Amino acid sequence: MTDEEAENISRVEELAYEIKISEVMNASTITLTPDMHMSEVVEIFRKNRISGAPVLSSTGNLVGILSMEDLIRCLIDSDLKASINKYMTTKLITVLNTDPLVEALKKFVATNYGRLLVVDKEQKLAGIITKGDINRGLLSALEYDFQTEEVKKYRASHLFDDIESNRTSLILRYQIKQGDFTHGGQASSNIKRALIRLGASKQIARRCGIAVYEAEMNLIIHTTEGGAMRVEIETNQITIDAYDSGPGIKDVQLALKAGFSTANESVREMGFGAGMGLINISRCVDQMKLDSVYGKGTRLKMRLFLDHDHSNSGLEIDSEERN
Amino acid sequence: MNNLAQIIQDLDLNLLTEQKDFSDIQIPAGYTSDLLSCVIAGAPSQGVWVTIQAHLNIIAVAALLELNAIIITEGALPDDATIAKANEEGISLFNTKRNSFWVVGKLWELGINAE
């Protein structure tokens, strides 16, 4: 494998390296013995709906494999009375049961065979693997990945139903470091995932994700010491609180204007500082309140209503500055 | 609607993230801007985003909006962390020597329009 190929490994390919042949092979294989008649093979193949089987000696050693093709050769010769010995293939293509699936895949590609014999360390037959077994193995592994997420989603979505109180809420808190662009968007991504797991609609998760992202980036870009995000999820509303301890906004009304930004050159080069952050937030939430004291800090409160009564209520922006 | 395989071929894009069955990925619409807040406001879900920005935060934005692909223009090259993050989020990253205007023009010719 070249370096370039190694870089392009998808999840399925990853699984081909993770899953062992023994996990997907068929271990309860029907086996033949060399002295059986070919006529018996016809019956065994038909009854078990198989098109090939390994041949084991009386001591249990793997000595050959008999496939449909061998049987056809025998039928053409009208030689059904012959023993398996005469028609079986003795050139054996085997894979180790402890090898990853990818080893079997390579041999399938190289040989064009429909099935491979699986052996253990002592070269004893452990089972048989077909291309179908590999597909099934990969599919169930992918399904497992999917189900694990579904289970998490199911458990979380029942959280609010299972707990009785006059007012239940789930509070998520995130510390955001100043200048930490490497983790920029992590809080919003986590919150978005949490909302989906809790059963929120994609629309709500997206709106909330955008609002949190912009608030999160504001804490990273504009604060002196970073800040914190507090997201309170209730069955009827989501309340997001982003606050920091400085430097505060000089002119709150100006900060709320589209296109106004105080971001420095290096931050602008990264595409931030469009002066659209608070505007984006206002598009995504039902209520927002920006409260800032220059020299002290800023608090941005946002609220999304989840019940439909509020969906057309229009945005209420409320802002304050105290000097 | 166009699939991503067609776009990669016609625009001769250089794939930076892992190989996928791109013929299975449909691109409904596109967007271009280098200002992240504008992208957040305007980029269509499942769409393609054309930008010269190549730093890690473009992935956070694309993940937030559930974009399928980002085309980085004028030969800008993201670092390994950005590529790794894109793989993790399932977003396909491409780059090209061409500029954004050329790329968008080509996309439009292919029938990828603004939302």
Image (spheres, rainbow, N blue to C red):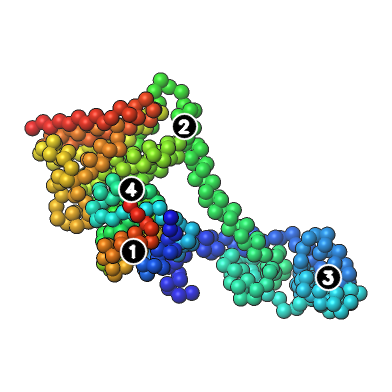
Indicate the quadrant containing the C terminus of chain A: top left, top right, bottom left or bottom right. Answer: top left
| Number of the label disc, if any, that sits on residue A159 | 2
Would residue A89 be seen by someone viewing this image from the given angle? yes
x, y percent for residue B100: 27, 62
Say above or below: A258 vs B100: above
| Mark-to-mark CA distance, 3 and 4 | 62 Å
Q: Nearer the viewer, mark 2 or mark 3?
A: 2
The reply to whether label 1 and label 4 mark residues of one chain is no
Write down the residue under mark 3: A33
Which quarter of the figure has residue A142?
A: bottom right
| Mark-to-mark CA distance, 4 and 2 | 23 Å
| Number of the label disc, if any, that sits on residue A186 | 4
x, y percent for residue A151: 52, 41
Give A122 or A104, whichever is nearer the viewer. A104
Query: Is A232 on the left or on the right of A97, as rendered?
Result: left
Q: Which amino acid does the dot numbered 1 rest on?
A: Lys
Q: Which amino acid does the dot numbered 3 rest on?
A: Thr
x, y percent for residue A203: 39, 39
Give A207 or A321, whichever is nearer the viewer. A207
Which residue appears at 27% of the width and 38% of the height?
A283
- Neighbour class for label 1 at 10 Å: few (<14), some, many (≥20)? some
Label 3 sits on a secondary structure element that is loop
Residue at the extreme top = A166
Query: Is A189 on the left or on the right of A272, as rendered?
Result: right
Instruction: Please state the chain letter of the residue tagged with numbered disc 3 in the rendered image.
Output: A
Q: Which amino acid does the dot numbered 2 rest on?
A: Leu
Write down the residue under mark 1: B106
Which residue appears at 87% of the width and 79% of the height?
A77
Q: Earlier in the sequence, mark 2 or mark 3?
A: 3
Q: Earlier in the sequence, mark 4 or mark 2?
A: 2
| Mark-to-mark CA distance, 1 and 4 | 33 Å
